[in-house]
Amino acid sequence: MIERHIHFLRVEHPAAEETVDGARDRLAAKFSRGALRRMTHLGLLVGSTLDGLAIGLDDTVVYATTYAETRALEDYLTSFPEASPLLFQTSIHPSAVQQVLIGRQQPVRRFFPLTGRRRLVEQALLTALIDSARQVVLLGGEERGTWMLATRPIAPDGADQETGPCPTLPDFAEALAGRREMHWRGAGGGFTLQWS
């Protein structure tokens, strides 16, 4: 059995109506003025969850997301025909984490940006569990999209016949925030989240 212990936990739950500008106002004290101006909503939320956590060069960062920077990508696409280089830069998949690490001038040797849907939480947990680093930072998040989300085909969540239901990223975040235990049988074996 492989175990990891949680030593630092922070979950950001912004209000449903929070805008990027609202997040900038709420979280301004955590970022430099220059970084704050260029960050996406998801970048701000990821940065807030990492506030107070020291990440070393030899630590590993695992980032799980299904839609990532959807809103930033929407903004980039609507900027054509005069496409914005800044919007392009912030619209790529692992941008939220990169915005924070670049702002901190924090290099890491191992960064695993993962994307998926049905087994995303398991993929992220397996990556974190088998990594040999002393500290593994597990992050996850989504940016609220608008028109683009409606155009993406979504496979149904739920149980695979052989392995059982895997929690979604929001379900897992809720369990972490509420210090709630979870157990499921997954593609990588049995998974248990327990608190002491």
Image: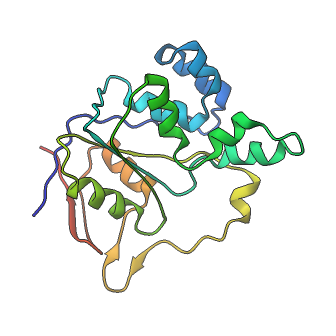
Residue 109: where, in percent of width, then height?
A: 33, 41
Q: Is residue 77 left or right of residue 129?
A: right
Residue drawn at the location 29% of the way across and 26% of the way down = 54
Residue 17: where, in percent of width, then height?
A: 65, 36
Residue 173: where, in percent of width, then height?
A: 39, 48
Hey, which quadrant is residue 147 in on the image? bottom right
Q: Is residue 127 left or right of residue 149?
A: left
- Residue placed farthest to the right in the image? 81
Residue drawn at the location 21% of the way across and 42% of the way down = 6
Residue drawn at the location 35% of the way across and 34% of the way down = 10
Hey, which quadrant is residue 189 in on the image? bottom left
| Image vertical order of residue 143 relative to residue 120, above or below | above
| Image vertical order of residue 97 relative to residue 73, above or below | above
Total count of labels: 0
| Image vertical order of residue 125 relative to residue 92, above or below | below
Residue drawn at the location 31% of the way across and 45% of the way down = 176
Residue 153: where, in percent of width, then height?
A: 66, 71
Seen from the viewer's position, the closer of residues 93 and 44 is 93
Seen from the viewer's position, the closer of residues 114 and 185 is 114
Q: Is residue 14 left or right of residue 118?
A: right
Q: Quadrant of the C terminus?
A: top left
- Residue placed farthest to the bottom in the image? 161
- Looking at the image, what colour scheme do you see? rainbow
Q: Quadrant of the N terminus?
A: bottom left
